[in-house]
Image (tube, helix red, strand yellow):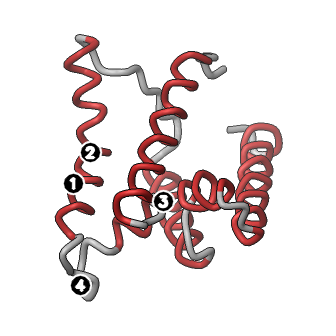
Amino acid sequence: MTEFTPLASLIGGAMLGIASVLLMASHGRIAGVSGIAVRMFPPYLDKDTPGRVAFVLGLVAAPLLYAILAGAWAPVNVTSNAFVLITAGLLAGFGAVWGSGCTSGHGICGLSLLSLRSAVAVVTFMVTAIVIVYVGRHLVGG
């Protein structure tokens, strides 16, 4: 069972919301991680590339900062094998491209802008995630 952490979730959600608003206010951009990450490479290189790189480095640096401040790494329990993890990553990447955005872009920014396309995307990936977890835990036995 996953540990219930409402305070950490609230703080994390607030930080995501604030970061999304700041990116929109300062650059007029949606804080979709897949869109930011893909635009770090050609043919998208432009004056905003250093900001995109800094954004992605911040995603990587956050757990390191946590470990330094907390004095230990956050506990992580990965129970799937490498094949499942790689397949899931490729499917998530394909879904982000096919859906013209990722969970952060549609779920945080798109919903706050009352985008019908984002609402459909969020319902689609949430229902898919629920079905996959159900099948994996109850029918396949993982």
Q: Mark 3 or 1 closer to N-term?
A: 1
* Residue ID at (28%, 54%): 56
Label annotation for residue 42: 4
The quadrant in which the N terminus is found is top right
Q: Mark 2 or 4 closer to N-term?
A: 4
Q: Mark 4 or 3 closer to N-term?
A: 4
Disc 4 from disc 3: Cα separation: 22 Å
Which circle, 4 or 3, is nearer the viewer? 4
Q: Secondary structure at mark 4?
A: loop
Disc 1 from disc 4: Cα separation: 17 Å
Residue position marked by numbered label 1 in the rendering? 54
Q: Mark 1: which amino acid?
A: Ala
Q: Camera-side residue: 29 or 3?
A: 29
27 in relation to 1, above or below: below
Q: Are marks 2 and 4 in contact (CB under 8 Å)?
A: no
Residue position marked by numbered label 2 in the rendering? 58
Q: Are marks 2 and 1 in contact (CB under 8 Å)?
A: yes
Q: Mark 4: which amino acid?
A: Pro
